[in-house]
Image (cartoon, grey):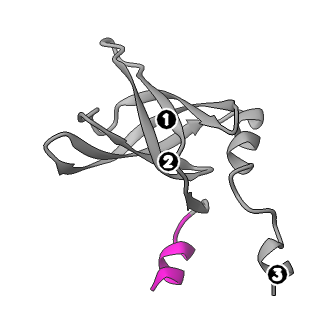
Amino acid sequence: MPDEYGSKRKFPRIPSQNALLVKKLAADRVEGFAKTRVVGLGGCMFVSDEHLGVGTPLEILISVRGTVAKAVGRVVYEVPQGPREVHVGVEFLELPAPDREVIESLFPPVGADEASV
């Protein structure tokens, strides 16, 4: 089953906890800190203490090993987990090449699995 799920994804994803700053690009320009749970080249999932609104455009700054990746994305899902916890899924709409490289650094090198066999 996990292989089927992974094969449907456009981009690989990994569990990764990284601090991030989330800014709404809407008129209210709310911003706050959160922590990722899952990161991929196509988006991320993080935990928020409030709903942001499906479809809301965001600017996201993700801290990765002493550097920051900047992306523009939109909320694609929100899953309430309790009274003050919402899992927020974001699709990246803009991820410039230098920022993409920062995200890619979270992934194991290609062929790393084969080398350990």
Q: Residues within 10 Å of mark 3 (few under 14, many from 20)?
A: few
Residue 56's disc number: none
Q: Amino acid at mark 3?
A: Glu
The residue located at (19%, 39%) in the rendering is 84
The residue located at (74%, 49%) in the rendering is 105
Q: How many marks?
A: 3
The residue located at (26%, 35%) in the rendering is 49
- Front-most of 92 and 62? 62
Alpha-carbon distance for marks 3 and 2?
A: 27 Å
Q: Quadrant of residue 55?
A: top left
Looking at the picture, does residue 28 appear above or below residue 20?
Answer: above
Front of the two marks 3 and 1? 3
Residue 114's disc number: 3
- Front-most of 9 and 66? 66
Q: Secondary structure at mark 1?
A: strand
Q: Amino acid at mark 1?
A: Gly
Q: Earlier in the sequence, mark 3 or mark 2?
A: 2
Q: Locate residue 46 relative to residue 67 in the image: left or right.
A: left
Q: Quadrant of residue 53?
A: top left
Q: Position of residue 31 (x, y in %)?
A: 38, 20
Tell me the residue that label 1 is attached to.
73
Disc 3 + disc 1, Cβ < 8 Å? no
Q: Amino acid at mark 2?
A: Cys
Looking at the picture, does residue 16 appear above or below residue 30?
Answer: below
Q: Position of residue 88 (x, y in %)?
A: 35, 45
Tell me the residue that label 2 is attached to.
44
Disc 2 + disc 1, Cβ < 8 Å? yes
The residue located at (68%, 52%) in the rendering is 106
Alpha-carbon distance for marks 3 and 1?
A: 34 Å
Q: Which residues are magenta?
A: 1-9
Q: Position of residue 11 (x, y in %)?
A: 61, 59
Give the overall secondary structure of the magenta segment.
helix
